[in-house]
Image: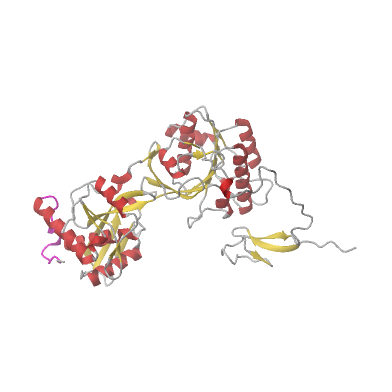
Amino acid sequence: MAATRKPSTAYRCTECGWNSVKWVGRCGECQQWGTVAEVAEQTGILRGFTPNAPTAERAARPITDVATIEAPRRPTGVGEFDRVLGGGLVAGATILLSGEPGVGKSTLLLEVAARAARSGRRVLYVSAEESTAQVRLRAERTGALHDELFIASETDLATLVGQIDQVVPTLLIVDSVQTVSSSLSEGLAGHPSQVREVAATLVRIAKERDLPVLIVGHVTKDGTIAGPRLLEHLVDVVCHFEGDRQTALRFVRALKNRFGPTDEVGCFEMTGDGIAEVPDPSGLFLGHGTPVSGSCVTVALEGRRALPVEIQALVNPSSTPNPRRVVNGVDSSRVAMILAVLERRAGLKLSALDVYVSTVGGVRLTEPAADLAIALAIASALGEFAIPHEVAAVGELSLSGEIRAVAQLSQRRTEASRLGFVQFVDAAAKHLPTALDTVRTHADHAARRGLAPLDRHSRGPRDVPEF
């Protein structure tokens, strides 16, 4: 009798699935340490395997014969969160919300739980990081107390499932998936195998019971979701909650959404009473004083939203051989390129000056559509003339000084017109010197009307560059 062949041993990365014939400390694909584990590799996948005949309901059919069914949605009561989700929660959907520690994930989900409870839905909020007393204190502060909102503090997956069977909620919130562990998997809570087991169980419960499940996920120091990448594949929706601790503004973005768009952004503001929606954040990133030199407004896109953002610049004679370049809210390498274009293509002498560029309100601009506004703000600071509040600029700068068109220009124009901007400088100017002349002309006209002083007094007797 032939000896039974034992399954061979292989090693696989729990993060990305990379395979190796021997154990290594570092994955050769994703470069993560300590993620390669031993697995039993079966030889002969089909040996002893008996296929099951599909039923008539599950049999494959032409795609043209498949009926389209619109997934019903139930609003959470938080309009900005519903905007990101595509209209509300879908029955059986699993939603992962990630973000930096302290950004407000638990506060947002507690507000979602409270509003769902007020609408007559039974909600179970399971906190594996805080005690029930701590959650109660936060709920009192934010006004989230309701009899239909049940809270529990559990770190064991089996006990968590028992809580679901006992409460029978219509909405489940788990905070967080990295702090819940299962006895069926090895390792401590947060280990990739534990995160995978807990997430798979929650997804299975959501599908079997048509129960919407909101899961909080931790992030690593580089901003990615902690745990195996499989976690993002298991869930239906992945949202990221972002914001600066120094400012009260918060954004929720959808990175993945099987039931809606991924280009929507929800805007919130952290207050002493919890978290508040900001349905129209257009005025948060604009200055409200008298126009001064070194300021220009651009219209940026956050998802599908067009938001006017004021960019401020300051130039000052440098006291060191290497002038300083300090930026806040914009890309430093992009500002360096814009300074080179201004000096080479527009003749502005900036190499011996300290240059400071910042955005108002703590917003961060990453798209190249802000290039023109940055250039005009720097030129305004150097020339000591104030750009009127009625002027907005949008455009990408090339190294040749050409102004390129940007995406969704009509939407940006519409938002600028709604907010009272009557002059829109964009790719129609074609070249940077032309745009500088246009803005300078508007500044001179506004100064003659008394709307925007030229603001030359701070430079003293030195000559003011003309362009």
Q: Is residue 462 above or below residue 59?
A: below
Q: Position of residue 123 (x, y in %)?
A: 53, 33
Quarter holding the N terminus is: bottom right
Q: Is residue 461 magenta?
A: yes
Predominant SS along the magenta part: loop
Q: Position of residue 443 (x, y in %)?
A: 15, 56
Q: Which residues are magenta?
A: 450-465
Q: Quadrant of residue 86?
A: top left
Q: Is residue 193 magenta?
A: no
Residue drawn 10% across the image and 64% down it: 461
**Nearer the observer, 418 or 204:** 418
Q: Quadrant of residue 274?
A: top left
Res 360 seen here: no
Tell whether 420 sits left or right of 148.
left
Q: How is the image coloured?
A: secondary structure
- Of all residues, the one furthest to the right in this rendering is 1
Tell whether 348 sits left or right of 108.
left
Residue drawn 23% across the image and 59% down it: 377
Q: How many marks?
A: 0
Res 315 seen here: yes
Residue drawn 38% across the image and 49% down it: 304
Q: Is residue 117 above or below residue 325?
A: above
Q: Position of residue 465 (x, y in %)?
A: 15, 66
**Nearer the observer, 137 or 148:** 148
Q: Position of residue 445 (x, y in %)?
A: 11, 55
